Amino acid sequence: MLWGSLFSALLHPIDTLRTIWYSDLTNRYSNFTELLAERSLSPALLAGIVPKVLHSALLISSLHYSTNHDLHPLLTVASLVVIYPLLTIKSMQQVGGTRLSFASSLAMPRLDRALWAGLVPHVVLSVLSAYSIGYMLTDSRSL
């Protein structure tokens, strides 16, 4: 669990740059090199690191516990659902200073709805990738 969370923290600045790049609705950056030049070595690259590391630690713990205690895989899917708002908060913190930021979202009348936006595709893709990886790693080809 510690190594996964540490790896997540080390890669967080790259994730922040990617999030800023994809959320650039005003075309402020004409290419990724401009973004990198402006934001490199900026403390803002660490925005959202706490929810990201917390999400990673909880997910890894859930996977570890369900694997070692022979629990039903749906419990891991349930944990994906429960901890999903941490990913939303992370993304909102990464795009600080824009209308997509966490501070702007606090003023929304339905912040609870915004925290769960994107949950269904996230869970579907996570489950599909988990089954694909499991299928590739097992000798028996039955699910």
Image (spheres, rainbow, N blue to C red):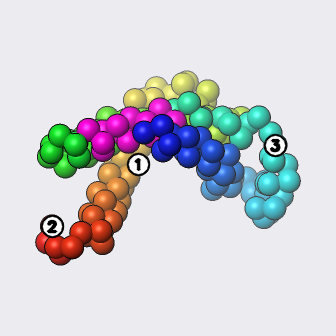
Cα distance, mark 2 to mark 3? 46 Å
Numbered range of the magenta stretch = 53-65
Residue position marked by numbered label 1 in the rendering? 118
Label total for image: 3
Q: Nearer the viewer, mark 3 or mark 1?
A: 3
Q: Is residue 44 left or right of residue 136?
A: right
Q: Secondary structure at mark 3?
A: loop
Q: Residue at x 32, y 51 (%)?
A: 123
Q: Amino acid at mark 3?
A: Leu
Residue position marked by numbered label 2 in the rendering? 143
Residue position marked by numbered label 3 in the rendering? 41
Cα distance, mark 1 to mark 2? 27 Å
Cα distance, mark 3 to mark 1? 30 Å
Q: Amino acid at mark 2?
A: Leu
Q: Earlier in the sequence, mark 2 or mark 3?
A: 3
Above or below for 128 versus 96: below
Decide whether residue 51 is among the magenta residues: no
Decide whether residue 63 is among the magenta residues: yes
Above or below for 79 versus 129: above
Above or below for 56 versus 50: below
Q: Is residue 56 left or right of residue 129?
A: right
- Mark 3 and mark 1 in contact? Answer it, CB < 8 Å: no
Q: Earlier in the sequence, mark 3 or mark 1?
A: 3
